[in-house]
Image: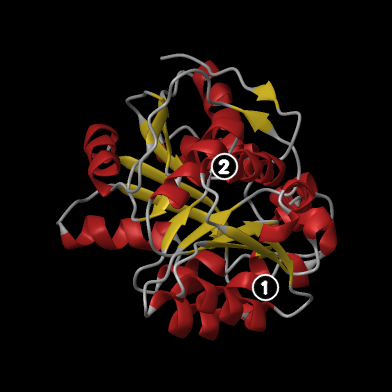
Amino acid sequence: MSSIQMQKASKPTRRSAAERMVEYGAIDNEFTVMEADIGKSTNSYLFGEVYPDRYFQMGIAELNMMSAAAGMAAGGRPVVVCGYGVFLSMRALESVRSMICYPNLNVKLFASHGGITAAIDGVSHQSTEDISHLGTLPNMRILVPCDTISTQACFDLAMENPGPFYMRYIRDAMYEVYGGEQDFRIGGSNIIKKGSDITIVSYGDLLFQAVEASNELFKMGIDTEIIDAYSVKPIDWVSIKKSIQKTNRLIVLENHQRRNGIGYELAYRAMSEGMVCNFISMGLDDTFAETGDYPSLLNAYGLSAFHVVANAKKMMGKAR
């Protein structure tokens, strides 16, 4: 039983991913990159500066961009498609489904501004339904890293494994939780902190809220186990199930609609196997978010560390 120390990050995961993309360009000289007119925001312009002949600015036309990416991938060249998560997952959904996932083409979706991390950009740029939409598509895999090390590892996983991937990144610099050698795999997860009272499963930016809450709960004598479910699809049910069997309590915290998020999937898996546990799913409750700063939005929609602590205390019968 212990608390966790997080280090302030110097850059957001969208920047870390773009920098790794540049590095990977020297390892693999086959893949190309397509961008939807927001290269400065996704940071994909870094690749274009180094490899201008492999970088294509497609304009504000995500549907057409996906079709072009499918055509190039069908010809044998892997493609990384960059843009905001909300547009890659919804404006271009039919093209992703029929032209990329159906033929199982080697196209990687690089999605910046995941969930409500878009915050001040407003609901039109907040991708709070993307995992639900893309997670239903056969052949699509979804990776959501939280910091620099996990971002670089997940980018490599997507590039080294053929077929479609959706990689969801954070708008702003937040924290670093990983250090040294870490194991990342498709269908994997990592235990950030071991505990015996409550299992907390999260991914991406809200993993930091889980850690902050865990540190507060530690002071109250509540021992939490935190699992980073960076592989959202396929999810690491084996490891999560083992943790739930130990704690008999589960909190799922995700920057996404609760409906059809990983909370729904884990509840289904548990019920289908006859498991019984105390369960709370934390996410947007069938609502759009508002425009505002990121911390205020977390508080407004019950996704902050404060709300995790309150739910954990309720579970343990220690609510005031």
- Which residue does the image show at 41% across and 57% down from the upper left? 263
Q: In this orientation, does residue 287 appear? A: no
Closer to us: 280 or 55: 55
Quarter residue 42 falls in: bottom right
Q: Quadrant of the C terminus?
A: top right
Left or right position of 302 against 227: right
* Residue 173 in sight: yes
Identify whether 19 is placed above or below 61: above
Which residue is most to the top?
2
Residue 288 in percent (x, y) is at: 69, 70
Residues packed near mark 2 inside 10 Å, few (<14), some (14 to 19) or many (20 plus): some
Residue position marked by numbered label 1 in the rendering: 87
The residue where tag 2 is placed is 24
SS class, disc 2: helix
> How many marks are shown on the rendered structure?
2
Marks 1 and 2 in Cβ contact (< 8 Å) = no
Q: Residue 134, image x and y in percent?
A: 48, 70
Q: Earlier in the sequence, mark 1 or mark 2?
A: 2
The residue located at (54%, 43%) in the rendering is 145
Mark drawn on residue 16: none
Q: Is residue 239 left or right of residue 124?
A: left
Quarter of the figure that contains the N terminus: top left
> Tag 1, which secondary structure?
helix
The structure's colour scheme is: secondary structure
Is 253 situated above or below 32?
Answer: above
Of the pair 125 and 101, the residue shown nearer to us = 101
Spot occupied by residue 256 in the image (x, y as percentages of width and height): 57, 60
Amino acid type, residue under disc 2 in the picture? Tyr
Give the Cα separation between the discs numbered 1 and 2. 25 Å
Q: Residues within 10 Å of mark 1 (few under 14, many from 20)?
A: many
